Amino acid sequence: MTSARFTLRQLEIFSAVVRTGQVKRAAQALHLSQAAVSQALTELADALGLTLFERRGRDIVPTASARQLLTHAAGPMAALKQLPDRLGQHDGSSQTLTGAIVLAASSTIARYVLPTGLATLRRDHPELDITVLSGNSARIEAGVADLQADVGFIEGPAQRADLAVHAWRTDNLQIIAPPDYPVHTITADDLGAHAWVARESGSGTRAVFEQSLALAGLATPRAALVIDDSGAIVRAVANGAGLACVSQLAARQASAANPVQFVDLPALSLARPLWRVRRDTLVNTPIVDRFCTALDQALA
């Protein structure tokens, strides 16, 4: 029996096509031509003697064989990508991080989650230069996709198909009210009867809050005041601007100097994952991989 011959590159291209659902999207994500992606799929299918995709309109749908292939290949692919770092751990080379990393983080993460971990990394890796860019989740995704940042951290679900997205940490949102507000009058069913302060469109916090309301069958209250900074929102609420929903981390830290009341509505589920986003490319970036691992350890 002749052994099937295929490459890791073909498997990686195949994986990207499965995730994006289109040859065009996969080609854009991998910075390849559509012809190169199609050729890799054809060569892989021929090597394995399998039909990997079926066309449905503009999209292509993986067959049962393709889904099995992806399941079997995911582990070995991940292990091979980690091989340079694994070998480096045993050849006497230093594991100190050196060089420059640019990370982008949505405003709440940049202000309330990352600083402690980044300080630890700078202490442990003095030759590592870190630049942090901040903005709302939509801007962070665009920055990573446009090569302005090596890795991004966002609060809302990723909206782009050309990024690799991984659940990173868990956060909770918190409804807050002014210090003298009659919070006993607030119920989930009448949120629209109150004045609200909200993050801007494109904010992950705002998107998650609106999704939570929709899942509970509730309408989104109108925002009478829109501010693009969670700390500023807490200060506005503390001074009587209305109700708001912000990260619990932001609420706790900012309210130390600007007292607000915390409002709990059991009918609403306000837990949310935070996400790490990377460019969905095959570029070997071991320093970024090691940086992400070290950051997770520093934040643990």
Image: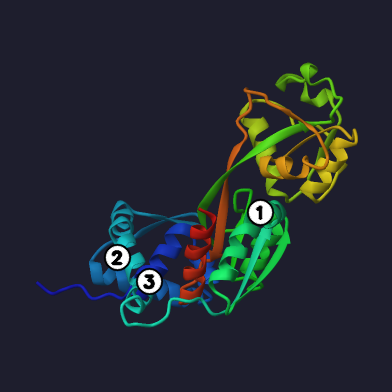
- Residue found at the far front of this picture: 123
User: How far apart are labels 2 and 3 at the CA level?
Assistant: 9 Å
Q: Residue at x 63, y 73 (%)?
A: 147
The quadrant the N terminus occupies is: bottom left
Q: Earlier in the sequence, mark 1 or mark 2?
A: 2
Residue 38 visible to an observer of this rendering? yes
Q: Which residue is mark 2?
A: 76
Q: Which residue is mark 1?
A: 109
Report the disc number at residue 81.
Answer: 3
Looking at the rendered structure, the secondary structure element under dot 3 is helix
Q: Residue at x 67, y 40 (%)?
A: 248
Tell whether label 3 touches label 2 (CB within 8 Å): no
Q: Position of residue 251 (x, y in %)?
A: 73, 40
Q: Is residue 98 left or right of residue 109?
A: left
User: How far apart are labels 1 and 2 at the CA level?
Assistant: 33 Å
Looking at the rendered structure, the secondary structure element under dot 1 is helix
- Residue found at the far top of this picture: 185
Q: Residue at x 44, y 63 (%)?
A: 17
- Residues 11 and 60: in front is 11
Q: Is residue 2 left or right of residue 217?
A: left
Q: Quadrant of residue 180?
A: top right
Label 1 sits on what residue type?
A: Ile
User: How far apart are labels 1 and 3 at the CA level?
Assistant: 28 Å
- Residues 182 and 66: in front is 182
The label nearer to you, 1 versus 3, is 1
Q: Is residue 135 left or right of residue 117?
A: right
Looking at the rendered structure, the secondary structure element under dot 2 is helix
Label 3 sits on what residue type?
A: Lys
Does 283 sit above or below residue 70?
Answer: below
Q: Residue at x 51, y 51 (%)?
A: 167
